[in-house]
C-alpha cells in the first residue's frame, strides 16, 4: 500500500479522526447531549463553514464534548470536519425538504438536527454523524439516507467505509440495507 496508509486505505491521521468522533459520539449518546458532526469529503462545504465559528482545531473527543455541551454558544448547529480538523462549529446546514424524511421523523422522534444531517447529504457527498438529545441514539447520514441505532464500533466501521481512499468504489448502499 501507499506509505502511511493502512489496509483500509485510511491514513493514520484519518483513522484517529474517525476514532475520536466515534468515541465522542458514544459519550454524547450516554449523556443525551445532541450533536451534529459533518465530515467533508470531495464536495466543498465552504458555504456552510462560513455560517459558523471558525476553529481549525484538532479533532479530539474532549473538544467535541465541549462543543456540544448543552447551552454553550457552540452547541447549536453543526461541527464541520475537513482534512482531519474541526474547521468550524455552530454551522447552519440546509434542512431536508423531503416529505418522506418528515414523515419518518414523526415516527422516530427526529427533529431539526436529523433534518439538517440529512439535508447536508442531499446537497453534497458529506457524511453526517447525529446524536439525538431525546433518545441518545447515534445515526449516520449519507446521500439523503440514514442509518440509526448505531453503537460506537459500528459507527467507526461505517465512517471508515465512507472515508477510505477508494470510497467511490465501495458499495456503501449495502450499509443502508435492513
Image (cartoon, rainbow, N blue to C red):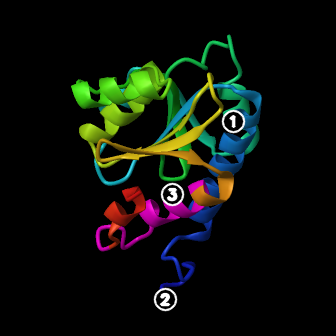
Indicate the position of residue 141 as horizontal and vertical percent values. 41, 44
As for residue 166 lying within the magenta part, the answer is yes
Mark toward the start of the polypeptide (3 vs 2): 2
Q: Residues within 10 Å of mark 1 (few under 14, many from 20)?
A: many
Residue lying farthest bottom? 1
Q: Secondary structure at mark 3?
A: helix
Task: Give x and y (percent) for residue 102.
Answer: 32, 23
76 over 125 or under it: above or below: above
Between residues 46 and 111, which one lies in front from this camera angle? Answer: 111
Q: Nearer the viewer, mark 2 or mark 1?
A: 1
Query: Which one is closest to the eye, mark 1 or mark 3?
Result: 1
Q: Which residue is mark 3?
A: 159
Query: In terms of depth relative to the viewer, which is nearer, 106 or 163?
Result: 106
For the record, the magenta segment spans 155-169
- Which residue is drawn at the image coordinates 27% and 43% (left, top)? 124
Element class at badge 2 = loop
Q: Main secondary structure of the magenta part?
A: helix
Q: Which residue is mark 1?
A: 29
Amino acid at each position: 500500500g501507499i506509505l502511511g496508509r493502512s489496509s483500509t486505505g485510511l491514513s493514520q491521521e484519518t483513522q484517529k479522526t474517525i476514532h475520536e468522533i466515534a468515541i465522542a459520539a458514544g459519550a454524547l449518546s450516554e449523556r443525551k447531549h445532541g450533536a451534529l458532526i459533518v465530515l467533508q469529503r470531495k464536495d466543498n462545504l465552504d458555504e456552510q463553514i462560513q455560517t459558523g465559528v471558525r476553529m481549525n482545531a484538532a479533532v479530539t473527543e474532549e473538544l467535541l464534548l465541549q462543543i456540544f455541551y448543552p447551552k454553550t454558544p457552540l452547541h447549536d448547529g453543526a461541527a464541520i470536519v475537513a482534512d482531519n480538523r474541526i474547521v468550524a462549529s455552530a454551522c447552519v446546514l440546509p434542512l431536508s425538504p423531503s416529505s418522506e424524511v418528515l414523515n419518518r421523523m414523526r415516527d422516530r422522534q427526529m427533529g431539526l438536527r436529523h433534518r439538517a444531517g440529512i439535508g447536508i447529504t442531499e446537497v453534497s457527498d458529506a457524511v453526517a454523524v447525529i446524536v439525538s438529545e431525546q433518545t441518545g441514539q447515534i445515526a449516520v447520514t449519507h446521500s439523503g439516507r440514514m442509518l440509526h441505532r448505531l453503537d460506537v464500533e459500528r459507527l467507526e466501521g461505517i465512517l471508515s467505509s465512507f472515508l477510505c481512499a477508494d470510497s467511490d468504489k465501495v458499495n456503501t448502499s449495502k450499509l443502508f440495507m435492513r
